[in-house]
Structure formats: C-alpha cells, structure tokens
C-alpha cells in the first residue's frame, strides 16, 4: 500500500516516512473519522499525526555549515595567525591539535582549524580574538566575535570556564548587560567566583556604570585571598590574570 501523502510503500496504519494515515482512521482528539492522507481533522482542527522533531537538527546543521563557510572564506583571504602567548591576556587551553591545528599555526596561513566539536571551535576563536585584541587588531577581533559567540551558544550547556569566555566576548562586543548576565550564571552557584566577578566588573566599567563595577570589584577583593587557592579548572587555566584583576579592582575600589 502506498502512502497517500509521500507514496512510501507500507503495510501499517501510518506511513513510516511522514506519519500520515495509510487508511481511514479516527481523529486522536475528537475521534471523528479521518480521510486517509488528511493532515487535519475537519471537525476539531487537530493535526492528524505528530510531526517529526527535525527542526533543531536542521538549524544546527545550517549553523555549522555557515560557520564552516565563513572560516573557509577567511582562509581564502590568506590571513595569517600567530603565537598565542600574549602575556596576561586570558586564553583557553590549547586543544590536542593546537589552536590552529597541528603545531599551533597553519603553515598555509589561515584561521583556527575547524573541528566537529563546537566547544573546540569556540575556544580556538576565543583565543584568536584575545590575541588580536592584545595586538591592537580590533577589526580582526570584531570579525571573529559573532562566530565565537555562535560557537559557544552551540556548545551549551557550558562549564564555568566557557561561560567566563562568553562573558569576555560579549563585553568585547559592547554587549555589557549580556556579559554581566553571563557572569551571574556562574555567581548563582559560587558568589565568590573571581573570574566571574572580574568579568562583571570590567563590563560595568566599560559601560560607564562605576557604582555596579565597584560592587563587583569589592566582592572580588573580599574573596581574593581565600578563593584564589581553590583548584577550579578555570582558575588553573587563567590563574596568571588574577593578579591583574586584583590591581584593577584596587585601582577602582582602593586598598
């Protein structure tokens, strides 16, 4: 028997491909008779069959394709990467293949290597943005920002390290309220988290809200001596920037 909607062969009551009724059945809502192949009940308007939840997979596929296309376009432009050792600038830990693929930099001259793992892509883009900002290449950093934020969004749920990265990127893009909201995601579970407090404080300074910045930096200074000794993965990865954050906090709050 052929499905009246998509013509798939089947012997069951419903088409295995599209879910349409293979023969007259009753409405699953009001039990009124349904004509084979009908999509909606003529009595109550209820859908005759449940649609397959394919949209999230389609959206994810489109997003990955778009990210890959932009990365390929950048490689075609012949831009070169460089060393990720940028002093106290926060960077994500390098992956097993290095931030630009094997060896750390693509000898062909290009953007961060594309991975099947959205978090790997996000961290590589984060590192590139931090490097470009440290080198004063604001235009290049802004070029990569939307890609990095999209990649972190695709990598949800994020750990505290990933949320911290996202807060810094949002602040770098002028999304100061969003940066604070990201920092608050961490602070909900750990009100003394130094990186989250510093990220929120920096965002408020950039936004011109000195009062709120002082609040975050005061909390940072109060928690610093005890909190910096904790062995959170993100503290191990970004420990070198904590003293710089401490100086920023002291400069604003005093003491």
Image (spheres, helix red, strand yellow):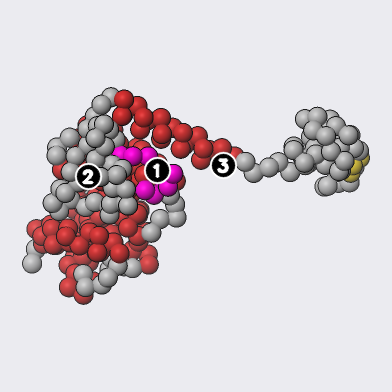
**Tag 1's secondary structure?**
loop
Q: Which residues are the magenta region? A: 112-120
Report which residue position mark 1 lands on: 115
Is residue 158 at least partly visible in the picture? yes
How many numbered badges does the structure rendering display? Answer: 3
Q: Which mark is residue 42?
A: none
Report which residue position mark 3 lands on: 57
Of residues 170 and 203, the one drawn nearer to the viewer in this rendering: 170
Q: Earlier in the sequence, mark 1 or mark 2?
A: 1
Q: Is residue 75 left or right of residue 224?
A: right
- Where residue 72 sits: x, y (%)? 36, 29
Is residue 169 at least partly visible in the picture? no
Residue found 26% across the figure and 31% down from its top: 108
Residue found 28% across the figure and 61% down from its top: 234
Q: Which mark is residue 130?
A: 2
170 versus 200 height, above or below: above
Query: For the residue carrying disc 2, how many other residues have a C-alpha within 10 Å: few (<14), some (14-19), or many (20+)?
Result: many
Do callouts 1 and 2 mark residues in contact (Cβ within 8 Å)?
A: no
- Where residue 68 sits: x, y (%)? 41, 34
234 versus 73 height, above or below: below
Residue found 13% across the figure and 58% down from its top: 244
63 versus 76 height, above or below: below
Q: Which of marks 3 and 2 is nearer the N terminus?
A: 3
Q: Is the magenta stretch mostly helix, strand or loop?
A: loop
């Amino acid at each position: 028997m052929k499905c009246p909607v998509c013509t798939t062969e089947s012997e069951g009551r419903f088409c295995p491909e599209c879910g349409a009724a293979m023969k007259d059945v009753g409405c699953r809502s009001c039990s009124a008779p349904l004509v084979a192949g009908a999509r909606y009940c003529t009595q109550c308007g209820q859908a005759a069959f449940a649609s397959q939840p394919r949209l999230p997979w389609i959206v994810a596929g489109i997003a990955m394709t778009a990210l890959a296309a932009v990365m390929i376009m950048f490689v075609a432009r012949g831009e070169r990467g460089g060393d990720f050792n940028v002093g106290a600038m926060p960077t994500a830990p390098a992956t097993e293949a290095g931030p630009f693929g094997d060896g750390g930099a693509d000898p062909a001259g290009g953007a961060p290597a594309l991975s099947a793992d959205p978090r790997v892509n996000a961290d590589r883009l984060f590192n590139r943005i931090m490097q470009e900002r440290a080198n004063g290449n604001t235009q290049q950093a802004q070029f990569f920002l939307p890609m990095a934020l999209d990649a972190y969004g695709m990598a949800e749920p994020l750990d505290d390290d990933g949320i911290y990265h996202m807060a810094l990127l949002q602040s770098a893009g002028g999304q100061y309220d969003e940066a604070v909201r990201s920092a608050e995601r961490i602070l909900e579970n750990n009100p003394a988290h130094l990186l989250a407090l510093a990220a929120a404080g920096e965002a408020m300074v950039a936004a011109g809200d000195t009062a709120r910045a002082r609040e975050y930096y005061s909390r940072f200074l109060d928690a610093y001596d005890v909190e910096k000794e904790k062995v959170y993965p993100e503290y191990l990865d970004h420990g070198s920037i904590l003293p710089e954050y401490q100086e920023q906090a002291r400069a604003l709050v005093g003491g």
